[in-house]
Structures are given as structure tokens and as C-alpha cells.
Amino acid sequence: MSDESSFRPRLVLRFGITGHRPPRLVEDRHDTIKEQCAEIFRLAQQSLEELQPRHPDVFSSEPAQAKLVSSLAEGADVLAAEAALESGLHLSACLPFPPEVYAKDFGEEEWRRTAALIEKADSILALTDYSRGDEAGYEIAGQIVLGQSDILVAVWDGEAARGRGGTTQIIAEAVARHQPVIHVDATGGSEPELLWSGLHAAIPDRPSVDGVERADARKALPALIEALCAPPASNGQAFVRDMIDPQDKRRERVVAWPMMLGLTGARAWSKLNFTPGDAGESIRQSRDLALPFAQNGHFGTMLNGPLLKRFGRVDAHANYYALRFRSSFVSNFAMAGLAVLLALSGLLFPEAKKLLIAAELLVILLIIANTRGANRINFHARWLERRHLAERLRQLMLTATLGRLSLRDVEDGTRDPGWTSWYARASARELGLVNATFDREYLTKARDTMVALIADQAGYHRNNARAMHHANHRLHKLGDWMFSGTILACIAYLVLSLTIGTKVGIGRFGMTEIVTFLTALFPALAAALYGIRMQGDFAATSERSSVIAHRLERLKVAIEMDPLRYDRLVERSRRLSEIMLADVQQWHLHYETRPLSLPG
């Protein structure tokens, strides 16, 4: 795979299957159900093949691919899996128990049929936490299938659930999380229907099975696939193309922000970085997330290859644009202070007034040019979008090892996803189901990887909290000194004017000129420092990082105390994703309301 093609996601669509088992699924309906599933799969593959050529600059040149994830239970699961293979789809197996245990839930002939499908699966995930026949095992496997799917095919008779983790429960959960469901009627009473909140004019909050809109599945499927898989329209596609083949490949030195951190003591001078790190550095820092799973089939190859490269590039881009944006506003306020200094210097050096005015004009033009240039490139939007995507990909590298692709965990995704969500989901679809047995050895590896990530991120946030607090404190103190200097200058002037008069001075400079200079300059410089503090949001950033570090450390303790079970690790991984993505959401809220503007 060439370097550029590593960043072009393959066009992949993932189906899941849930449905009844005998005797609830009568044998007389098997052939019809299998043919209806096959028709859906063929139409989906055709739609993908028509979609891919319309976006050659976004999708990789590999053939579009549709996949089915199935637990391969007797009945609907097996029928759909056979239909998928016969229709040219790939099959992934998510088993509630290891095969030798799972076989005991089948008759001899039925198991031969399922075992043949397991042999044809390109990846096999098997749970080991549950005993034979345990409904909890089927429920967890159903949840994994749901999390692995763009579209859920449900062979359902329309009746209420009759047990834990059953078809009705899985369908209700899919509809509530805005996941499209294709209902294949197990009784034969109706043709396949699409149940999807995206059919509503206004997307409802947590829709129900009874209230969700429905449409003819065959007619609606091409438009559904377009909505799920096509890259974002207009400006969004430009962002995706920039991710694939960056147009701004320069990484020039950036001075203002690092200098500010050094001058305030927030960072040691020896640790200041004036040149943003490249993708290789980001990859090296995160390789430990992927490397333990390198041997887990296609999943491991994808995780340690394209997905790690994508994270490295977008993380480096996010760091670069963050540095450029922060340096832009620090430069603006610093130059604003310099402009005031130049203007006031005319009081002390009237013979140089023209030169000082020219210099002041140049500084003001530089501020305008800096502001317009930063807004034209849109540094803060590029930073936040790429940071969001980097965190989505980082979490994906962790959660996917537990079978969670997070295709619907962050946003409803019913229509018109943003480019960050689209790219994260496209990468998740391509990554797919991990080929692994979730035994004690594997779960220990997954837990240790999660704990290591938490420790790394907690350490980062602790250091960031200290640095931002230190910078905020120093800037605040310096501003106070400026105002104190103004007060002292005013008092000194009043005292001198009432005692020895204002004719005294220092050298060629009279008292009036000196006091006017200081009492105008100091407040202006204090205002510039205050502007840097407010734009940089140092205090809130410090507090936010401190809270996140505390939450991460508590989560780490909880994971280490938990029994080593799959369901507990999944619950903890969800909590980790919430904590990490909440930080990005806070940045969005702050900087959407405070874009770079002229200081004033």
C-alpha cells in the first residue's frame, strides 16, 4: 500500500444480523428469508460499486466491500450468513462461546452447517466468560454485532422479547441509537422494511420501534448507503482531501507561544519546542496501543499500519494548527502593546515622531495581516477538527480491540455527518472485527493497554494543568504589577507636584512626560496580558486538565480493582472515551465563541 493510499479509506459497508431461532422461526420460511437477505446484500453491493467511482479522490482503489457480522446461531443467523457468502459478501463471526463450547448448543447436523460457516469467516471473535447456553453470552455477542454494524438485518416476527438479549431487545437498541434496521418479516406477512430515524424530517431523540419511520427496504437502500458511506458534501470533502494529501506541508518554526511559556516559567527553556512534531513522533508515542495486537490477523495489520499512520498524521496536524493559532493571538496582543509603546514614545522623543509613527503603522498592519491570514487559513477550526478526529482514532485503536467500532456512539449519524465523524467511521469499518479469543490472556493484554493509555493521558493532563496554572498566575501577577506601577506613578506625580513641583525630571525628560508615558503604557500592557490570558483560557484549561487527570486516575484504580471480565472492560472503555472526548468538546465550546480577532 503506497503512503498516500494508506490515508484513503476503503469503501466498506457492514451488516449485522439478528433474528429468531427454531422453533420460533419456522422451517417453511427459511428459503424465503434467505432469498430476501440475498436480495438486500446484492443490492447493497451494487450500490457500493456505483458509489465508489464518484469519489476517486477520497476512497482507495481497492474494490468496495460489504461484510456481514453474525453470531451464526441456528436459524436467522445461519440463513443470512449463507445468503451473504453466496452474494459475494465477506463474513465475520462473533461467537458467544468458544467453538467447542458453542457446538453443545446445536444438534449434530445443525453444528456442521455452522462450523462450515465459521471456516469461511475472515475473522472470528469468541467470548469465554460464559458457560454453555448462558443467555448473557448471547446478549453480549448481540451487542458486539450491533456495534460492528452500519445496518442491522433483523429477521423478526414483530412480537415481544421472550428472553434476555433476544431479537426484539437488539432491534429496540439499534433504533434508539439511530442505527438503520432492515426488518425481514419472519412470518411472511410483509416485504422487507427499513426502520430508521433518518427518514424523519426532524431527527427524534432516542426513537422507539413503534414510532420510528418506515420505508420499502429495496427502494430506500441505495439512498441509505449514500447517506452512511458517501463523504461529506462541498467543504467537507476538501477537508478529507487535505487529510489524505495535505496541501500545507510546511512546518516552519513557531515562536510566540513557546516564548510566552518560557518567559512565564510554564515550560523549562530546554523543553521548549519551536518546531511542531511530525507524524512519525505521534506514531512513536502511540505505537504501544497497536503493537500488542499486531498478530491478530487483518485487524492487527490494519491497526499497526494504515490506522496508526492516520492517527499520526492527524495528531501532528492538530498539534501544528494549535501552535499556529496560539502563537497568532499571543503575537497580536504583544504587537498591540508594542504599538502603544511606539505611540507613547513620541512624547519622549519628539524628534523621532515620524519614524515612530511609521513603525507604529507597520506594527498595526502586521496585526491586521496576522489576523486575516490566521482567519483565512482558519487555524482554530483546523486545530479543533483534527484534534477531535485524532481523539476518535486514538479511542478506536483501543475500543476496537474489544470489538467496539463506535459507529454510533458519538453522534446519531443519521444524515450529513461532519468530515471528522465520516473519516473516523470509514476507518472503523475498514478495521472491522478483531480475530481473537477473548480469554484471560487476551483480556489481560487489552486491560494493560487501556491502563497504559490512561496513565499516559493522566500524566499529560497533570503536567498541562501545572503549566497552564503557572502561565496564568505569572501573567496575572505581571498585569497586577503594571497596574500597581500606574498607581505608584500617579501618586508620585501628585506628591511631587504638591511639594517640589513638576519642573523636575530625569535628564532631558520632564516629570509630566514621564508620568504620562508610564500611566498610559502600563495599563495598555496590562490589557494585552489580560487579552492573552482570556484568549488562551489558561485558568479554565488548567482546571479542566486537573479534573480530567483526577477522573482518569480514578478510572485506572477502578480497572485495576475490577475482576477481569469482558463486560467490565467494555464499560470502562466507554467511560474512558467519554472523559477524553469531553475535553475536545470543551475546547470547541470555548473557541467557537472566541475566534481570532483584532485586539481592541
Image: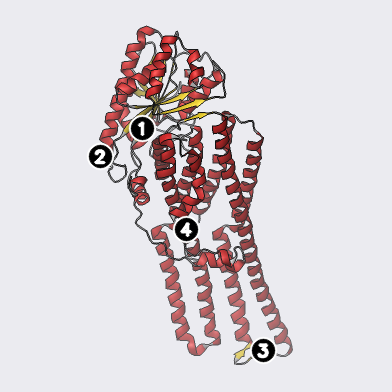
N-terminal-most mark, 1 or 2: 1
Q: Nearer the viewer, mark 3 or mark 1?
A: 1
Residue that numbered label 3 is attached to: 502
Residue that numbered label 1 is attached to: 13
Q: Is residue 505 left or right of residue 158?
A: right
Q: Residue at x 36, y 45 (%)?
A: 6
Residue that numbered label 2 is attached to: 53
> Marks 1/2: CA distance?
16 Å
Image location of residue 403, percent across then percent down: 48, 32
- Residue 319 drawn above or below residue 486: above
Image location of residue 39, percent across then percent down: 29, 21
Q: Nearer the viewer, mark 1 or mark 4?
A: 4
Residue contact between numbered discs 4 and 2, judged by CB atoms under 8 Å = no
Q: Residue at x 40, y 42 (%)?
A: 423
Q: Nearer the viewer, mark 2 or mark 3?
A: 2
Residue that numbered label 4 is attached to: 277
Residue contact between numbered discs 3 and 1, judged by CB atoms under 8 Å = no
N-terminal-most mark, 2 or 3: 2
N-terminal-most mark, 1 or 4: 1
Q: Circle 1 — which element?
A: strand
Three-letter code for the amino acid on which mark 3 is drawn: Thr
Residue contact between numbered discs 3 and 4, judged by CB atoms under 8 Å = no
> Marks 3/4: CA distance?
56 Å
